[in-house]
Image: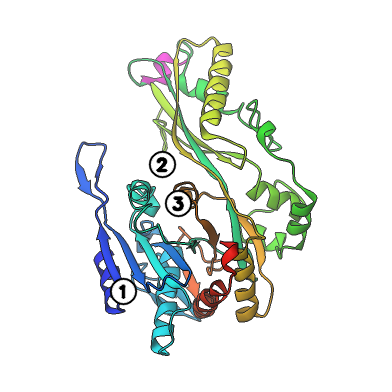
Amino acid sequence: MMEMTAQKLRLMGGTVELVDIGEQELPDGQTLALPKVVTARFGTDSSKYTVCVYGHVDVQPAKREDGWATDPYNLTDINGNLYGRGASDNKAPVLAWIHAVEAYQALNMELPVNVKFVIEGMEETGSNGLDAMILAQRDTFFSDVDYIIISDCGWLSRRPALTYGTRGNCYFFAEVEGPKQDLHSGVYGGTVIEPMTDLIGILDTLISPSGKILIPGIREAVAPLSDEEWKMYQDIQFDMDNYKNKIGVNQLMYSNKVDLLAHMWRYPTVSVHGIEGAFSDPGTKTVIPAKVTAKFSIRQVPNMDPAMVKKQVTDYLHSVFAKRKSPNKLKVTMVIGAKPWLADTQHPLYEAGKAAVKRVFDMDPDLIREGGTIPIARTFQDVTGKSIIMMPIGGFDDGLHSQNEKMSRYNYIEGTKLFIAYLNEVSQIKKTSV
């Protein structure tokens, strides 16, 4: 896939390189070469701005038997929707950017800005090796980049959007270990203090039924919602009934739009994802697990530091566990500590985005955040010091990571036009605004 992408860019006349980013060691000790990162350049005019477009061409696993209506790896057009794994996340946006450059070439028009590409093949598993590559090329490939554009996100509704923030992610393992082996509950039940009971007990202290995080210090670090933000959220096009129908629930945590969007985007949340070591197959099994590991995450927001969150969570769970006076052993590990990202919506980069949306769609964009985590945005910001914009073209109902992922023809074609228009708008930013 990486060579195919590189070859496409070469055929367009780009200066292309496949960058080796090393190896990945698997849990069994095996090492595999990481997919190379594709970098490309179109234009070297020092009098123009240089923008760098980031994207990825790897995808989540998918099988027809998982519930897909079509072959997930054979792009299928049904009623104006293009179905296939990666259709929205993130192959279509990458291709739309490539087609935007090709459009200028096809019309024999000079690109209004120099365009660079960074396209990776490991985003879905954590962008292994990419941070080091960006750091290594900070003073070479990225030295003349003025702005960075990421299109790895989606709209909130049918209205086009510009994304200006993402939450971070602190992902934890909480392991409770007891007897030396699994036990029969009929023989040993009632005689041992069970690891699963301990684990469920401490998990229940993370968050209240109303969604309040109970870990001391977490909520206190969050800046209060400003009047400006409240007004911005109030103006966003968002239908709560459609949202409920989309995810298949009849009640949400909050009953009004502003509270819901605020807790989706700019407040931290705790989510429990699973328990390793517990019996979860169909049927029955009367086992007492000897060791169980809970997996949970805290989506963090600006003003929260992963190192501090790690300490707060670890100290809190150990204090809660100590009160149980259990002989079992607790081990808390933070395995991911991705930081949040936030941009200034008044920056000329966003003003150019608003103008491009208005030009193509004849409406103003929603200014939104992402509740999820896109670590590369913060990496680009911290390492290169460049201004970043997220410019999505995916629909709110594209089904990223789900069965029957799609992108509509409308979003793809109009999204390509948006990218074409945006390059022109960026070229008109005053040089004093960089």
Q: Earlier in the sequence, mark 2 or mark 1?
A: 1
Please tell me in which quadrant of the rendered image residue 187 appears.
top left
Q: Residue at x 43, y 64 (%)?
A: 52
Residue 186 magenta: yes
Q: Evaluate if marks 1 and 3 touch, with contact meaning CB atoms under 8 Å apart.
A: no
Q: Amino acid at mark 1?
A: Gly
Please give left or right for residue 344 compared with residue 152 in the image. Answer: right
State the SS at label 3.
Answer: helix
Q: Report if the CB atoms under discs 2 and 1 are less than 8 Å apart.
A: no
Residues in magenta, as a range: 183-189
Q: Position of residue 138 (x, y in %)?
A: 38, 52
The residue that mark 2 highlights is 282
- Label located before the other in sequence (1 or 3): 1
Gap between marks 2 and 1 measured at Cα:
54 Å
Q: Looking at the image, how many numbered discs can be counted on the residues? A: 3
Residue, disc 3: 384
Residue 345's quadrant in the figure? bottom right
Q: Does the magenta run of residues contain 81?
A: no
Residue in the foreground of this view, choosing between 151 and 172: 151
